[in-house]
Amino acid sequence: MLRKMLLITLPLVVIVAGCTPKNPEESAKHLKAGIESQNNGKLDEALAEYTKAIETDKSNQTAWYHRGVLQVAKNDLPKAIEDLSEAISRSPDTVRFYDARGYVYITMNDYGKAMEDYEKAVQKDPKNAVYINRRGYVYALLKDYITAVKDYTKALELNPKYEDAYSNRGFSYLSLNKFENVVSDFTKAIELNPKRAVYYNSRGYAYANMKRLFDALPDYDMAIRLDSNLADAYVNRGFLFMATEQFPFALADFDKAIKLGMMTAANYNARGFAFSNLRNYPQAINDFSKAIELDPKFTDAYVNRGFSYYNSLEKQKALKDWQTAVGQKPKLDSSLKSYMEKAKK
């Protein structure tokens, strides 16, 4: 009986589906309503309208596109890919569809597929600086910084006032340790947009790596002035204060960075080093211990805690830490040997 029912009903389903009418005018009305709802933040209403637009005319590639973009806002990335792929299949020459899907692939960390989409976008619109810049960004995500720089440069040739391209190229130069280029690009980005804290922080970091500490400090100060929650800027300024032996200021900056959520082994170790230089050994030991808890292979933390124990007259604990450090990095034996001998007495 079951097979007979299937044989009877299946053709009826096919016939009904085949007779579904297209209504482009009705579809366009739902699409417009969906866009209005989305602009007003009514995402569920927008989703319903886009779906109606598709149901009344499946060839409406713009409705597929908008629903796909909406799925990103609703954090349903697989459905976004499905909708944007449908839009592309119905209109394979519409470049913004590839751009949108490429963005979703980036968000999903699928950089290979993102690259395919941006290659398509650039191929179809080779004079569009935006798509070339975004392809460069994917190259950077793939750690091909040299090729990324080439794309950013092409984008800037097409649009010399393209802020994002200067910023992106600056970050790629940073990864290539080309600090003079970093300074140049972020200086230009700052000219175009002087309110971005991250630009000052990045240029300051480049200055610091060029040993131009007194150029780096005003940049870090400006970054923090523009964004008091930019933890990276506190970390970078903290290391600058360490390098210039301004330990109270370094302590304050690392403390702020940790409170902002940068609870890394490196930051606890750095704050501990500031405490130790201010002869607050108990607090230093606490921070070095936290660094070791977070990263048991962090050799510097063992070395530093050893000195704090030694200065606290806990020589056996100091000896144990130094032995651990030498076990991890045998080359430290020569520099720690004399201290270890004193700790044994």
Image (cartoon, helix red, strand yellow):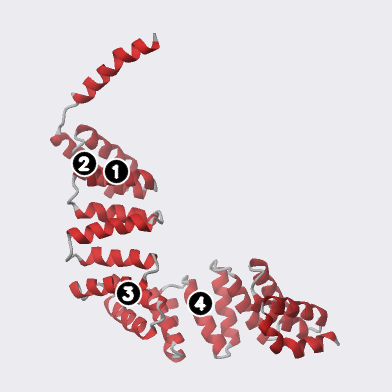
Residue 16 coordinates in the image, percent (x, y): 22, 21
Please name the residue shown 66% across and 82% down the image.
Answer: 275
Label 1 neighbour load within 10 Å: few <14, some 14-19, many 20+: many
Report the side of 99 relative to 27 (left or right): right
**Residue 300 image-quadrant placement:** bottom right
Task: Say what secondary structure mark 3 lies in.
Answer: helix
Label 4 neighbour load within 10 Å: few <14, some 14-19, many 20+: many
Label 3–label 2 contact, CB within 8 A? no
Question: Vertically, is 250 above or below 33?
Answer: below
Query: Is residue 32 in view?
Result: no
Real-space CA distance between mark 3 and mark 4, rounded to the nearest whole angstrom: 24 Å
Disc 1 residue type (three-letter): Asp
Q: Look at discs 2 and 1 and give the one toward the viewer.
A: 1
Residue highlighted by disc 2:
31
Label 3–label 4 contact, CB within 8 A? no
Q: Earlier in the sequence, mark 4 or mark 1?
A: 1
Q: Residue furthest top?
A: 1
Real-space CA distance between mark 3 and mark 1, rounded to the nearest whole angstrom: 32 Å
Residue highlighted by disc 1:
83
Q: Residue 338: which numbered mark, if any?
A: none
In the foreground, 215 or 9: 9
Q: Earlier in the sequence, mark 3 or mark 2?
A: 2
Real-space CA distance between mark 3 and mark 2, rounded to the nearest whole angstrom: 38 Å
Label 2–label 4 contact, CB within 8 A? no
Residue highlighted by disc 4:
234
